[in-house]
Image (cartoon, rainbow, N blue to C red):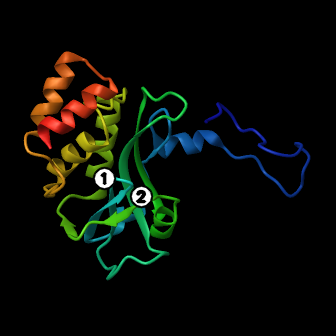
Amino acid sequence: VFFAENKTIMGNDSSSYKSSVNTDELQAVTYGAYGAIELVNELANASILKARLIYLDGHPMLLIYDGTVQKLQFHTMVTRIDLVFDITKPTNSVCRCETLSYGSIIKRKKKKIELGASEYTLSKPISALIEFCKNYQDKYPKYSKSYHNCRKFMILLADEIGLVYKDKWAAECMGYACVATSQCDTDASGILFKQIFK
């Protein structure tokens, strides 16, 4: 949540050990209604970028990191890119492009965590990925289980950066187009979609 002006978050205004946060500055370095797309990224200075896919209970995320990193460690800083829905309003999509530690991602309480076997060297800078996320958020503000979901986002992101998305089903993109045309977004349509195209 962003505020229009400087405000004291906790305590009273006369606290000598606290200072106000200028939330206008925060807005200037993030994008979107949720502020989940960071516009300032340390990876802008990296000469080589590497990427890996990770799946948390089947949910795909792309992890981008400095090409000098030999192996992802708990403390390695990564930029996590994915699409989720707003918990308070599930019809709204939230495109995330945020810097976190690898450890903070894998220590979440999930039943199954899978790290993709392939490591990719990216030919595009982090600024191109940020721009892709901004454009996607603007073009698809609504989340749909059947046709604007995390899988479709990852397929389009993979195409954008020349990554082979091995988890893609046969004719999956055609399936998204068919379901989007019908505007049917029920649990039954999602199950039918998986049965037909998987």
Q: In the figure, 65 relative to 109: above or below?
A: below
Coordinates of residue 183 in the picture (x, y in percent): 25, 17
The amino acid type, in three-letter code, at marker 2 is Asn
Q: In the figure, 104 relative to 177: above or below?
A: below
20 or 64: which is nearer to us?
Answer: 64
Which residue is found at the position 70% from the left and 46% from the top? 21
Coordinates of residue 58 in the picture (x, y in percent): 33, 53
**In the figure, is residue 77 to the left or right of 197?**
right
122 or 196: which is nearer to us?
Answer: 196
The amino acid type, in three-letter code, at marker 1 is Ser
Q: Are marks 2 and 1 in contact (CB under 8 Å)?
A: yes
Q: CA distance from mark 2 to mark 1?
A: 8 Å
Q: Residues within 10 Å of mark 1 (few under 14, many from 20)?
A: some
Coordinates of residue 38 in the picture (x, y in percent): 44, 49
**In the figure, is residue 163 to the left or right of 107?**
left
66 or 148: which is nearer to us?
Answer: 148
Q: Which residue is mark 2?
A: 41
**In the figure, is residue 97 to the left or right of 126?**
right
Q: Which residue is mark 1?
A: 127
Q: Which of the labelled discs sits on residue 84, or is there none?
A: none
Position of the N terminus by quadrant: top right
